[in-house]
Image: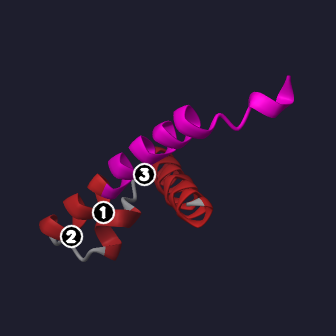
């Protein structure tokens, strides 16, 4: 479970860096990596949604900030 959380956090960071690149330069890196294939492009975008939902679940279920009090 910890490995999944680390992997999905890395996925969200990579998407964030790609979004910054797109915002600053107009180059859509994900579109270039998928060679314009809309199905693969949308599948990878849906992975970001799954990653975000997993991290919300992880934060609610395991409360990693509980020990900080």
Q: Magenta stretch: residue 35 in it?
A: no
Separation (CA) of disc 2 from disc 1: 6 Å
Which residue is denoted by mark 2 in the rendering? 40
Whether the residues at callouts 2 and 1 have beta carbons within 8 Å, the answer is yes
Quadrant occupied by the C terminus: top right
Which residue is denoted by mark 3 in the rendering? 51
Query: Against 30, is 45 above or below?
Result: above
Which residue is most to the top?
A: 69
Separation (CA) of disc 3 from disc 2: 17 Å
Task: Give me the disc on residue 44.
Answer: 1
Q: Which stretch is magenta? A: 47-69
Q: Magenta stretch: residue 55 in it?
A: yes
Residue in view at x 51 percent, y 44 percent: 55
Residue in view at x 30 percent, y 63 percent: 44
Separation (CA) of disc 3 from disc 1: 11 Å
Task: Give me the disc on residue 33.
Answer: none
Residue 24 in the image: state x and y as whole percent.
51, 46
């Amino acid at each position: 479970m910890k490995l999944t959380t680390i992997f999905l956090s890395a996925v969200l960071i990579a998407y964030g860096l790609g979004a910054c690149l797109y915002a600053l330069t107009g180059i859509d890196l994900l579109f270039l990596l998928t060679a314009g294939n809309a199905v693969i492009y949308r599948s990878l975008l849906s992975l970001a949604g799954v990653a975000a939902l997993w991290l919300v679940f992880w934060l609610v279920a395991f409360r990693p900030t509980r020990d900080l009090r």
